[in-house]
Image: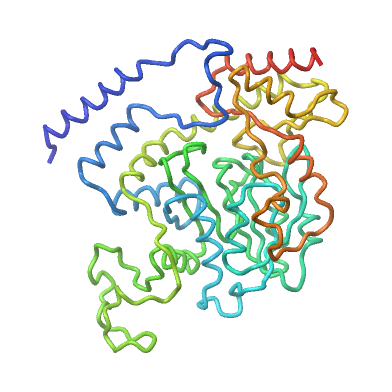
Amino acid sequence: MVDPARSRLLEQVRAYHHAQVPGPAPFVPGQTPILSSGATLDADDRQALVAAALDLRIASGGITAKFESSVARILKRRKALLTNSGSSANLLALSTLTSTELGDQRLQPGDEVITVAAGFPTTVNPILQNGLVPVFVDIELGTYNTTAERVEEAISPRTRAIMIAHTLGNPFPVAEIAELAARHGCYLIEDNCDAVGSTYNGRLTGTFGRLSTLSFYPAHHLTMGEGGMLLSSDLKLAKLAKTFRDWGRDCWCEPGEDDRCLKRFELQLGTLPAGYDHKYVFSEVGYNLKSSDIQAALGLSQLAKLPDFIEARKRNWRQLRAGLDGLPGLLLPEATPGSDPSWFGFIITVLPDAGFDVSDVVSCLERRNIRTRRLFAGNLTRHPAYIGRPQRIVGSLANSDVATERTFWIGVHPGITTEMVEYVIGTLKEFVASH
């Protein structure tokens, strides 16, 4: 039954949004910030958040379940588990593979996981946090992804998994690396946080690995404010992941449910008394990585706009690529052959003979209110956090060093207009001409 008071309040929320955000302000070159990333939020999003708050949906429940099933359907996975961040989703994915339920297939301390040296720490941290050994390989300049050849060279008798992110939305050669993983009996985890909607050989990224992850931080394609997701079509792994996410609890009922499984007082596990309340039986050393229905409500609202968001990102990237084509001193990005990226950013490397340094061009852009970012951590092996940690490096990391020293990226998110992109192009052309 419709509550008239609730309906009136939600209409007032929509009116409030339009009063506060009447429309985009005119773009003033050099004054209006052109952000590298940022959420695109509208009246539907504000109303969805308030509606969930009015219903006091303060924990994970029905809205979360609907968001999980909706994302799984769109991204063609059988199961999705909402988490409190993309970083937590990565931790959850790798931790799941350490379960004793996997028998000889479980990851154990000292096992190796192949990953990429140039990227964001949360693809690598779960390896170390689980007592595993990261094996670092280099990237290609232009695509900023590794290759199947580099990954194959890194495989050793201790290799048990491969965990790699699709860089800035540009897919790594995931079909070939998935085939390598299958041939060598390894798990593949796709960090798909930057690449929602990207395809490789016509197939969505995030569907090649046994597990894949998403982030809903404001910088990403969809936002919940904070949030992430693990996806899989392997029902056993998905069930184990739910256990690890939910404190390590063996019970599969939701926290607010009682005896949905009809076995709550009928099991005997571990050395516990027969019939011990299954809601308080723990089969894994897990975490609490859940999110809330309020955040999931925002995610559901955002999900309806995903096709438009993806197209805007592709359009802005194409405009930048065409407008900067042939500009001397700058190496422009290239899509991985066979891919159709849903771009996260537009990445540029300053060439050695450019006549200027990366700091020069970045300073120019920042002075014009064009925000820049580096390729995340660059070469992770050079950071204090990883020096002296267990690791193996295969081959040269020369390109990762180049990315550390001469690479940056600028935004392509839906909040950037055609006029803004033209200003970015003009600024870069002017800078290069003056140097």
Q: Position of residue 335 (x, y in %)?
A: 71, 36
Task: Say if residue 353 shows up in the picture.
Answer: yes
Left or right of 72? Residue 387 is: right
**The N terminus: image quadrant:** top left
Q: Point out the image quarter for the C terminus.
A: top right
Residue 4 image point, x, y percent: 11, 32
321 on left or right of 62: right
**What residue is drawn where x is 84% and y is 52%?**
396
- Residue 370: name its quadrant: top right
Residue displayed at 78% across by 59% down: 393
User: Is residue 173 in view from this perspective?
Assistant: no
On the image, the x and y values in percent for residue 139 come to 76, 47
Q: Quadrant of residue 290?
A: bottom left
- When the figure is inspected, residue 317 is found, relative to residue 198, above or below; the finding is above
Viewer-proximal residue, 43 or 353? Answer: 353
Name the outermost residue toward the right.
Answer: 353
Say left or right for 4 vs 351: left
In screen coordinates, is 348 left or right of 211?
right
- Residue 98's place in the image compared with 317, above or below, is below
Please give the name of the residue rendered at 43% of the width and 47% of the height, measured from the top-left corner: 227
